[in-house]
Image (cartoon, rainbow, N blue to C red):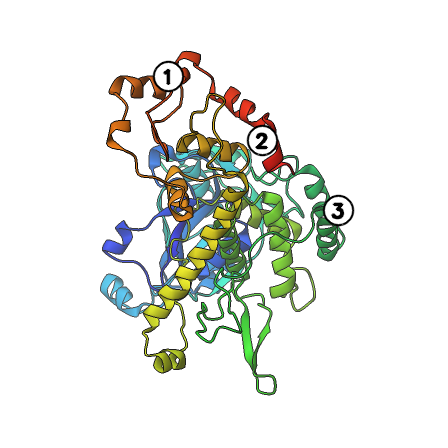
Amino acid sequence: MNISSTYYNEKPKGDEIAKIQFNQMTVSNDLLSSFISSGYCYCPTDRKLDRVRESDYICIDVDDSTVEMNEYVSTLTDKPTLYYTTPSNGNVEKSQQKFGDDRHIYRFRLLYALDTPTCNATEYEQAFKYITTANNMTFVDFRRANQYYNGSKGCELHNTHRVYSLPDEYRDVVIDNGKEKGGNLKPKQPAGGVSSGGGSGGTTLEADVLSAFLDCGKYEDFLSWYSSMFGASPLLRETPYLLDEEDERKLVCGDYYVIPKKYIGWDKENKTKIYGKWLDGEDRHTKIYITGIILRKLNPTASADDILREIVAILMTYYDICNPDRKLKFSKRNILQLLDSVMKADLTKELKEIKHPSFKVSSSYCDRNRVSKRAVVNEILSEKRMEKKEEKYSEIDFFFDPNLSWDDGSKITQKQWVEILKENGIEVSIATFKRYLDDRGCSKKRKKESIISNTNTRIFNTIRFSDDTFEEKDGYNESYVLYERKFREIIGEIHSTNEFRRKWAV
């Protein structure tokens, strides 16, 4: 399913339509329901007709009906998986303009989830006509597979959780002359889990992690096992800018957490906010999906195993995962489908509107010290950047020594130092290393006569050396060119010296 990168409170119009961007993702019926009711647009397959491939949903648009949605669905032999009212439902003005009466006012959509997906645009159209004919549907507006549908924020939406298998004869539908065979869909109950062996739909999970998750009797057991095997979660849950109780400037991102918490009320006695758990019908799937996206953004190297553990922990902490009848709402299959959607999301395009809230600064501090809020923000962010820079500098300090040189007495270039640091697990750019040298007082301005000829520059570049040194006397030593050492060999040589071992032994 292709889902729009942003939601719409009202039906998009004009320029908004041209700007809609879609991202392909794997969705469960619950997750798709949440997207639709939150106002996201969707398309069952690729937006370009010549690229239409598999489609797991058939979308049926019912316009200008004289029968309201629930009564309409009650007459169908095969109840749709999802059905919901569109933003224009109940529009009397349209009915009067088009039909001269106020009876054709009902507009809604029916979605059928398929266990046997269609494989191209023709099969999609055949399945569409098969379903609509078999159920004697009226007021149907056909749309091709590549056309999109608007969500409907705050709509009436029903999820029957039905999944259908199309019989083979659906392909016998003749589209050109409208000759269609009748028949019934074959309902199939949703399975309790997803296929393993490599993860859910392309999301790679380690075999032991997936096995522990699928075999656990309670989610608490899985979390306990994961912690015993891998320790505490390494992922950030809160904004990087946390409240420091000792800092009267009070620069915080509101009460922002990666996990949205449900505000219940105010505890007057303890002067704190009271939070509860999100319930069914409060967009739990969308919230947990967005949380997963933010976790990936904050932790680009996080594995699917880490995200799975975090999603389960978040569900247990911030969400009521049971229905009023105490039946589990979030099944293992639901969780793995959510994980698959999160891990497949393109972070360069997905949910661009997710940003940290505006910074808040203490007004009393600003008034007392006669400074602007922007000045306080810049001050604290500068401190944060300085802390981060010093952390990186301290790593470089452990390895860097301006007095070290090659066997022949030649200085080690900046680019060579960057490679040496990289060999030891410290990734820095040449620009960062130059700033490090300046801040540590190790950099010296190069004398003009030290610049080497264009010929030598070309030769040095062929063996991955550079004339970019922080200290030069008489240019490069020609022994580099004569020896034509491979860079890996030089790294190994400097690592084998007694001086290196004495300084950096661990």
Q: Nearer the viewer, residue 228 or 245?
A: 245
Give coordinates of residue 167: x percent, y percent.
Answer: 55, 37
Residue at x 44%, y 70% (from the top left corner): 251
Task: Left or right? Give the position of 325 relative to 473.
Answer: right
Instruction: Give the secondary structure at mark 3.
Output: helix
Q: Sequence order check: which comes first, mark 2 or mark 1? A: 1
Label 2 to label 1, Cα distance in Å?
24 Å
Front residue of 397/52: it is 397
Measure the C-alpha gap from mark 2 to mark 3.
Answer: 54 Å
Of the pair 189 and 394, the residue shown nearer to us = 394
The amino acid type found where label 3 is placed reads Asp
Q: Residue 77: in sight, yes or no?
A: no
Name the residue beneath numbered marker 2. 499
Q: Amino acid at mark 1?
A: Glu
- Place of residue 484 in the rendered image (x, y in percent of width and height, measured from the top left): 43, 14
**290 with respect to 435 (left or right):** right
Q: Are marks 3 and 1 in contact (CB under 8 Å)?
A: no
Residue 3 in sight from this viewpoint: yes
Which residue sits at x=47%, y=31%? 419
Q: Decide if residue 413 is on the left or right side of residue 502.
A: left
Residue 478 has which mark? 1
- Comparing marks 3 and 1, which lies closer to the viewer? 1
Return the disc, 2 or 3, that comes first in the chain's sequence.
3
Query: Which label's residue is closer to the chain start, 3 or 1?
Result: 3
**Of the residues shown, which amino acid type is indicated by label 2?**
Glu
SS at badge 1? loop
Q: Point out which mark residue 215 bears.
A: 3
Quadrant (top left, top right, bottom left, bottom right) of the N terminus: top left
